[in-house]
C-alpha cells in the first residue's frame, strides 16, 4: 500500500477513505488486503467503494444531482421498499391467522 496508507489510521476521514478506495480501484491493493491491514470488516470497505462509484457516476452526469437530491432519492426508495415489506408482512400474518382459524 502507498505511503499515505502506511501510517496507523486513528480516524477514517473522507480523504483517507478516498485514498484507500483509489488504491483499490487502481489495483494497488484489494479489499481483502485492506481489510487485513487495517483490521476492518471487508463489508465496510466494500461500502466505501460502492459509495465512491455512486459519487463518480453522479459527477460524470451531464447535470449532476446535488448531494441532498441524491439522499432524498435514496430515502424515498428505501421508504417505498419498507412500505412494500410491511404490506407483505401484514398479508402473511393475516393469511397465517386465517389458515390457523380454519384448522380449528
Image (cartoon, rainbow, N blue to C red):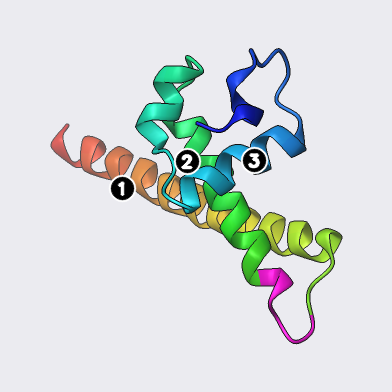
Precedes in sequence: disc 3 or disc 2: 3
**Residue 19 appears in which quarter of the rendering?**
top right
Q: Position of residue 99 (x, y in %)?
A: 22, 43
Circle 3 SS class? helix
Q: Residues within 10 Å of mark 3 (few under 14, many from 20)?
A: some
Precedes in sequence: disc 1 or disc 2: 2
62 in relation to 16, above or below: below
In the picture of the structure, the residue carrying the numbered disc 1 is: 95
Q: Nearer the viewer, residue 63 or 30?
A: 30
Q: Position of residue 73 (x, y in %)?
A: 72, 64
In the picture of the structure, the residue carrying the numbered disc 2 is: 46
Q: Is residue 56 left or right of residue 68?
A: left
Q: Residues within 10 Å of mark 2 (few under 14, many from 20)?
A: some
- The image quadrant where one finds the C terminus is top left
In the picture as drawn, the residue positioned furthest to the bottom comes out as 62
Q: CA distance from mark 3 to mark 2?
A: 14 Å
Q: CA distance from mark 1 to mark 2?
A: 39 Å
Residue at 69%, 70% (x, y): give it.
58
Which contiguous range is marked in magenta? 58-63
Circle 2 SS class? helix
In the picture as drawn, the residue positioned furthest to the front comes out as 3
* Front position among marks 3 and 2: 3
Amino acid at each position: 500500500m502507498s505511503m499515505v496508507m502506511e501510517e496507523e489510521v486513528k480516524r477514517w476521514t473522507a480523504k483517507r477513505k478516498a485514498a484507500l478506495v483509489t488504491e483499490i480501484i487502481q489495483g494497488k491493493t484489494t479489499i481483502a488486503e485492506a481489510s487485513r491491514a487495517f483490521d476492518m470488516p471487508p463489508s465496510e470497505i466494500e461500502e466505501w467503494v460502492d459509495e465512491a462509484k455512486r459519487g463518480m457516476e453522479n459527477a460524470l452526469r451531464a447535470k449532476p444531482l446535488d448531494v441532498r437530491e441524491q439522499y432524498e432519492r435514496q430515502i424515498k426508495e428505501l421508504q417505498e421498499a419498507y412500505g412494500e415489506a410491511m404490506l407483505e408482512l401484514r398479508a402473511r400474518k393475516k393469511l397465517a391467522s386465517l389458515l390457523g382459524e380454519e384448522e380449528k
